[in-house]
Image (cartoon, grey):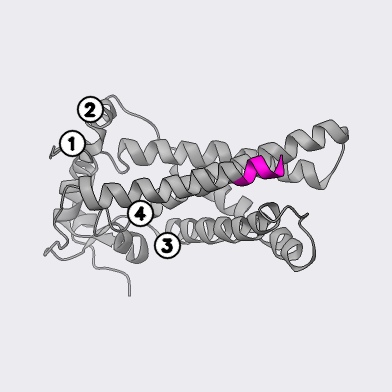
Amino acid sequence: MGHYFRLVSAIGLGGTVAALALYHLVLRRRRADRYEDKRNVRRFSFLERLAHLVAIISLLTLSVTGFAAALNGKSLDGTLWLVHFAVAPVFAVAVAVIAMIWAKDGHLELYDLKWLIHLGGYLWKKDGLPAGRFNAGQKKFFWFVAVFGILLILSGLGRMYPVFGETGQEILYQVHRYAALLLVMGVVAHLYLGTLANPGTLWAMISGYVSSEWAAHHHPNWWETVDKGDKTEEPES
């Protein structure tokens, strides 16, 4: 089983990186890298940015410690176990916060179907696609993280408290590491889409603010609903 998981992990992670690299070099539709308007539209609160950052950092930390042991065919112990054990609750809290604050924004609307049909414009040129505060792809990723994050957390708790017998523990172990693998693959794609594929997105998550031009281009339906006060609000210091 250990050899099989190492093979699947290599194919999954390597394939994800290779696919993103191929897309970026060959298929990516070039987009404007700069938006000249003043960034005065508040997009994310401090809590949203903090929870997002903590979730990504904690997941990557858990992945490094967990995969370091699994890919070497060893049990998680020593320093790796201590780090893994300490960071796991942080990840659980971050995922819970994200689920609570973005569940409403993650609700799929009828207009999201058009975005999905055109694959968000990633494979062919198609401007003016409808998108709320989150586009359809971001909404799908939100629910992907919610589902597999919960599986990861619950299976991890089950491993800590062995009440299901040897067979149950083995099932939980397999669920835990494959859920982790899928989450890491998804986060790798998420990091690419939030940086190189969509210039301006990363800065929005860092500062919390975007320009009106960026908002109107990437999230037109959300932009139409933004209050006048939010459009003219000065960025936080």
Q: Which residue is mark 2?
A: 114
Image mark for residue 192: 4
Cα–Cα gap, marks 4 and 2: 23 Å
Q: Which residue is mark 3?
A: 46
Three-letter amino acid code at disc 2? Lys
Q: Which residue is mark 1?
A: 129
Three-letter amino acid code at disc 4? Tyr
Q: Is residue 211 left or right of residue 70?
A: left
Cα–Cα gap, marks 4 and 3: 22 Å
**Residue span colored magenta:** 1-6
Q: Is residue 117 left or right of residue 125?
A: right
| Secondary element at image label 4 | helix
Cα–Cα gap, marks 4 and 1: 20 Å
Residue 11 in the image, given as x and y percentages of width and height? 50, 44
Residue in the foreground of this view, choosing between 225 and 208: 208
Q: Nearer the viewer, mark 2 or mark 3?
A: 2
Give the mark nearer the N terminus: 1 vs 3: 3
Decide: few, some or many residues near mark 4? Use Cα within 10 Å; few <14, some 14-19, many ≥20.
Answer: some
Give the mark nearer the N terminus: 4 vs 2: 2
Q: Tell me the quarter of the image containing the N terminus.
A: top right
Cα–Cα gap, marks 1 and 3: 28 Å
Give the mark nearer the N terminus: 4 vs 1: 1
Residue found at x 78% / y 41%: 158
Q: Nearer the viewer, mark 4 or mark 2?
A: 4
Image mark for residue 97: none
